[in-house]
Amino acid sequence: MSWKIVMSGHLDVGLVDSANKLYTAHLHVGDVFVFPQGLVHFRINMSKKQPPRALSAFGRSNAGTISLPKNIFGSGIKDEVLLKAFKIACAELMKLQAPFKPSK
């Protein structure tokens, strides 16, 4: 589990639960949002005027992070699996994988 409290500015946050339902919130100064452990979540500054400042805390000392695009498109999952899972053409898959291919 982790949480954020907005100290200044505004912050948009969200998460996807295990039933694939999206929950979002637009946080203002003093607002707190809790991210349950193991769920896909995001936070983003949508303001072009003021960068937000937020304090984060984690439920354990080594919370770690997982980059879904890197783990999906750069992990070596077979192309056939990704093509079927995402229902996309091979050209689209190659574009998605390009930034995550190891440089030689």
Image (cartoon, helix red, strand yellow):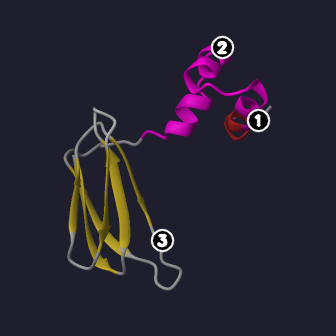
Q: Report helix, strand or loop for mark 2.
A: helix
Circle 3: is it few (<14), some (14-19), or many (20+) Cα within 10 Å?
A: few
Residue for point 49% across, 41% down: 67
**Where does the image place residue 44, in percent across and percent down from the top left?**
44, 63
Q: Which residues are magenta?
A: 66-95
Quickly name the residue at label 2: 80
Circle 2: is it few (<14), some (14-19), or many (20+) Cα within 10 Å?
A: few
Q: Is residue 39 shown left or right of residue 34?
A: right
**Where does the image place residue 57, in percent across and percent down from the top left?**
24, 57
Q: Report helix, strand or loop for mark 1.
A: loop
Is residue 102 in sight in this rendering?
A: no
Q: Distance from label 2 to label 3 (Cα)?
A: 36 Å
**Where does the image place residue 56, in percent across and percent down from the top left?**
28, 62
Relative to 71, say whether 85 is above or below. Answer: above
Q: Report helix, strand or loop for mark 3.
A: loop
N-terminal-most mark, 1 or 3:
3
N-terminal-most mark, 2 or 1:
2
Marks 1/3 in contact by CB < 8 Å: the verdict is no
Quickly name the residue at label 3: 46
Q: Nearer the viewer, mark 2 or mark 1?
A: 2
Q: Distance from label 2 to label 1 (Cα)?
A: 22 Å
N-terminal-most mark, 2 or 3:
3
The amino acid marked with disc number 1 is Ser
Relative to 90, say whether 30 is above or below. Answer: below
- Residue 26 is drawn in which quadrant? bottom left
Q: Which mark is residue 103?
A: 1
